Image (cartoon, rainbow, N blue to C red):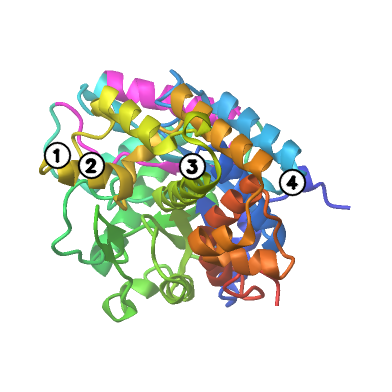
Amino acid sequence: MTDRASTDHLGAVIAAHKAGEAVGITSVCSAHPLVLAAAMREAAASGSVLLVEATSNQVDQFGGYTGMRPADFRDLVHRIADDEGFPRDAIVLGGDHLGPNTWQGEPEGPAMEKAEDLVRAYAAAGYRKIHLDCSMPLAGDATPLPDGVVAGRAARLLAAAEDSAAEPGSIRYVIGTEVPVPGGAHETIDALAPTPPDAARATLVAHREAFERAGLDDVWPRIMALVVQPGVEFDHLRVVDYDRSRTGELQHVLDDEPDMVFEAHSTDYQLTEALTALVEDHWAVLKVGPGLTFALREGLFALAAIEDQLVTGSERSDLLEVIERVMLDDPSRWERYYEGTPDEQRIARRFSYSDRMRYSLPEPRIEAAVDRLLANLARAGVPEPLISQYLPAQYARVRRGLLTADPRALLLDRVRDALRPYSAATRPDTDSTGDPR
């Protein structure tokens, strides 16, 4: 019998894709417990492995902006899995944008030392997928960075990961020099071009040569993905949709790499047909993050509107007002992203695709308001007509007996609405509702 704890889930997906199956895997890039619980429910429904990734600014050896180190995040995911009844051995943990991103203002020496410690912490905590991202210039660097410099630094991080892996030979890696900004574009997008095929080939050559020079050429079969830009992105108000006619030659750059597919970042808000086309065109790893907390925010706002109809003023959670106060009390989490008039900033804080609200959701005042909202609605009961008014997709599932009217269940199902297109795109045996055919 195969030991599921040591099963190479990622390798199985890559092998199936390279064998001609239009399959892939969704990478859930979020640290919010409700998002993680929803992702586990969706993975259970679609019969898929759950890939969960923490980014280098969320979780690092110092705590990141979540206050969690890699082992802490691992333990959080496992606790939620236990609560949800989701098997731990069906979870793959990954580290996204691991490199000197957080320390770009420092010279190469100290920045890379910290980056090596970061990678070691992830590897030692049992993470099985690591994105080696050295694409950003450091203090004193020329810009843009040559591929050779990026690849040489990635080789240093690869060596650190291999030396520290909880299980030797267990980690699969992602490389790439044309890496989208974590969390979506900071500015309005006017034009977005896919990566030129020759640039992608040059990246492969530079990394292979750097790994060989470092004596790590035996790791190459575990380089599972190359990050290139397929021409998808989002800013505050706009989504750039995938157009496969623009990536015809790029799609075939990895045809001679038997163990490697493309990884697509910033796929949030792509429609099902675009996600499906991406997988068919060999972007077999689809990363999503802000789109999930965006859906969580939509669900919370809908429940708050229902609460306004059912709960008297003094008992209400006042969730929207609490969020606004928290964000205004600490504008450092959003103000560099949102320009414009005070009214434009207010709309962006609440509704922007880039969803910088996610940085504030773990704040204790907001968490307390969410708990009060859910408790109020659990006591009051949520009538079907109000579900129909504010959560119509969930209303249909309640009527069909597929979902209860419990407020937490409604909220998690709303987050699953953002994941169902990914299930349909990465698993040909599921439909757009995420239910097996």
Cα gap from disc 1 to disc 3, whole angstroms: 29 Å
Circle 2 SS class? helix
The nearer-to-camera label among 3 and 2 is 2
Work out whether residue 89 or residue 347 is closer to the camera in this orientation and state it. Answer: 347
**Residue at x 28% of width, y 22% of height:** 329
Q: In which quarter of the image is the C terminus?
A: bottom right
How many numbered marks are there?
Answer: 4
Left or right: where does residue 55 sit relative to residue 145? right
Cα gap from disc 1 to disc 4, whole angstroms: 44 Å
Where's residue 142, x and y in %? 11, 37
Cα gap from disc 2 to disc 4, whole angstroms: 38 Å
Left or right: where does residue 250 sit relative to residue 170? left
Q: Earlier in the sequence, mark 2 or mark 4?
A: 4
The answer to whether mark 4 and mark 3 are in CB contact below 8 A is: no
Q: Earlier in the sequence, mark 1 or mark 4?
A: 4
Label drawn at residue 30: 3
Where's residue 218, x and y in %? 53, 46
Work out whether residue 63 or residue 337 is closer to the camera in this orientation and state it. Answer: 337
Label drawn at residue 86: 4
Residue type at the position of mark 1: Pro
**Residue at x 18% of width, y 35% of height:** 336
Look at the image and give the residue range highlighted in magenta. Answer: 110-139
Residue 239: quarter of image: bottom left
The nearer-to-camera label among 1 and 4 is 1
Cα gap from disc 4 to disc 3, whole angstroms: 17 Å
Left or right: where does residue 294 sit relative to residue 392? left
Circle 3 SS class? loop
In the picture of the structure, the residue carrying the numbered disc 2 is 346
Cα gap from disc 2 to disc 1, whole angstroms: 6 Å
In the picture of the structure, the residue carrying the numbered disc 1 is 342
Q: Is residue 346 above or below residue 198?
A: above
